[in-house]
Image (spheres, helix red, strand yellow):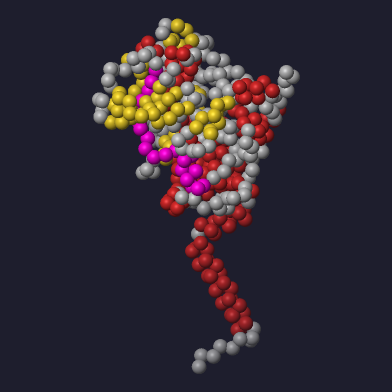
């Protein structure tokens, strides 16, 4: 097969033949309870990762699950290589969620390593908008597991589907302001992760959970990557599993992992060495696009078509979509398009920049994404201060009118009678 070279000048690249073949060989469609549609994900070979500082990956040192501690209740869902079940914790008397690998004995050691790494990453990220981990250990069969808070409510994907279906109770409750409230909390969680040098790399509505009392949680950190320095001086990044060495899998250009439609162009093209915080910012832009338009940012029904449109930056601007629930404010459209820019250097460079533009919009200020001029800033000022602006305009008109009357009087064109 003749390979087309990946061009990297000025971030100009294409989906090469090797990457496309790897992607097509690793596409998996999974059906979720939240949506009638099949969700397509790409699970290529395990990507490389740098172990977290202070995390011991020797499975022999993980605690053994006490007999009878957890009682199975029902399955909640599955994705990738793990299954999530609802269990009852005997010691605390509460129901919690347990993630496990049902076929752990048949799994490649690197898969188990990635699973344990997800558990350690999620446990490290103690934040109100990230699901907390309670316990990490090994069950009686020798398979790793970890337990988490049992989330109540529904995924953002299901919420958006109900909005698109026009359910009156949902549409009345989740207006633009409420949706931005949810999105800001997603940004808070991701921003905290970035401050810990951890990127999510699979942000999408299915991985956002909305609770019944305003809770918002970012879940499923299975593709997350630690960007800091290695936790060990060993250049090979060796870890232990049952006293056998497992080499850290090297980053391989051409391996795409994630969800088409939400993964960044660099992820879609398999440029793994280019993944950083801006990759998550791109995914956040795609989520905001879906939240406001209730539609996908890219056209196409096939994975390779969506990937090619992603890499080429062929995004349909929100207000050019048909069947919009309402027009999207220009400022929010500019924020979305900036976050989803094809070139990472032209996106928001960190979460704070994105948050500040959102705060500016909410507060009635011009956003940086709009590149506002002086007239735009003045217009936004008068809009924010409508009552003061009206008072000021009326005052100016009164002064002008009074001055004109005085001028007429002194020029003999106006007579004033006091009788």
Residue 379 point in image, percent of width and height: 58, 57
Is 238 included in the stretch rendered in magenta?
no
| Residue reaching furthest to the bottom | 419
Residue 80 point in image, percent of width and height: 49, 25
- In the image, taking residue 113 as reference, residue 413 lies left or right, namely right
Residue 111 point in image, percent of width and height: 48, 17
> From this viewpoint, is residue 250 visible?
yes
Q: Which of the 4 quarters of the picture holds residue 22?
A: top right
Query: How many numbered marks appear?
Result: 0
295 in relation to 38, above or below:
below
Q: Residue at x 63, y 33 (%)?
A: 302
Start and end of the magenta stretch? 144-165
Residue 362 point in image, percent of width and height: 49, 50
Is 148 included in the stretch rendered in magenta?
yes
Q: Residue at x 52, y 63 (%)?
A: 389
Q: Residue at x 56, y 46 (%)?
A: 293
332 in relation to 303, above or below:
below
Residue placed most toward the observer, 61 or 192: 61
Quadrant containing the N terminus is top right
Residue placed most toward the observer, 124 or 27: 27
Q: Residue at x 47, y 45 (%)?
A: 162
- In the image, taking residue 250 as reference, residue 208 lies left or right, namely left
> From this viewpoint, is residue 278 visible?
no
| Residue reaching furthest to the right | 2
- In the image, taking residue 7 as reference, residue 322 lies left or right, namely left
Q: Which of the 4 quarters of the picture holds residue 369?
A: top right
- In the image, taking residue 318 as reference, residue 144 lies left or right, namely left
């Amino acid at each position: 097969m003749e390979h087309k070279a990946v061009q990297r000048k000025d971030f100009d690249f294409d989906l090469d033949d090797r990457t496309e073949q790897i992607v097509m060989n690793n596409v998996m469609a999974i059906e979720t309870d939240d949506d009638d549609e099949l969700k397509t994900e790409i699970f290529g070979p395990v990507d490389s990762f740098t172990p977290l500082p202070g995390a011991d990956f020797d499975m022999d040192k993980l605690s053994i699950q006490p007999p009878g501690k957890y009682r199975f209740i029902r399955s909640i869902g599955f994705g990738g290589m793990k299954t999530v079940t609802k269990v009852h914790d005997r010691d605390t008397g509460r129901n919690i969620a347990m993630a496990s690998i049902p076929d752990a004995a048949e799994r490649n050691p690197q898969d188990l390593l990635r699973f344990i790494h997800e558990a350690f990453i999620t446990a490290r990220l103690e934040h109100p908008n990230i699901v907390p981990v309670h316990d990490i250990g090994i069950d009686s069969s020798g398979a790793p597991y970890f337990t988490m808070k049992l989330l109540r409510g529904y995924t953002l994907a299901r919420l958006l589907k109900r909005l698109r279906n026009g359910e009156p109770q949902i549409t009345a409750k989740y207006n633009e302001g409420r949706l931005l409230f949810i999105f800001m909390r997603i940004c808070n969680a991701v921003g905290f992760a970035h401050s810990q040098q951890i990127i999510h790399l699979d942000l999408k509505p299915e991985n956002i959970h909305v609770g019944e009392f305003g809770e918002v949680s970012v879940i499923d950190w299975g593709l997350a990557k630690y960007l800091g320095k290695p936790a060990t001086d060993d250049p090979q990044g060796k870890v232990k599993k049952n006293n056998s060495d497992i080499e850290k899998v090297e980053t391989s250009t051409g391996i795409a992992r994630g969800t088409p439609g939400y993964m960044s162009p660099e992820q879609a093209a398999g440029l793994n060495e280019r993944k950083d915080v801006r990759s998550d910012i791109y995914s956040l832009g795609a989520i905001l696009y879906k939240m406001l338009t209730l539609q996908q940012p890219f056209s196409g029904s096939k994975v390779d078509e969506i990937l090619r449109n992603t890499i080429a930056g062929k995004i349909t601007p929100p207000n050019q979509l048909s069947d919009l629930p309402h027009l999207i404010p220009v400022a929010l459209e500019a924020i979305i398009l900036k976050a989803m820019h094809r070139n990472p250097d032209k996106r928001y460079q960190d979460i704070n920049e994105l948050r500040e533009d959102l705060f500016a919009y909410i507060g009635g200020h011009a956003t940086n994404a709009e590149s506002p001029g002086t007239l735009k800033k003045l217009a936004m000022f008068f809009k924010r201060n409508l009552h003061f602006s009206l008072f000021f305009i009326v005052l100016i008109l009164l002064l002008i009118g009074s001055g004109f009357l005085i001028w007429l009087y002194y020029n003999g064109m106006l007579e004033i009678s006091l009788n």
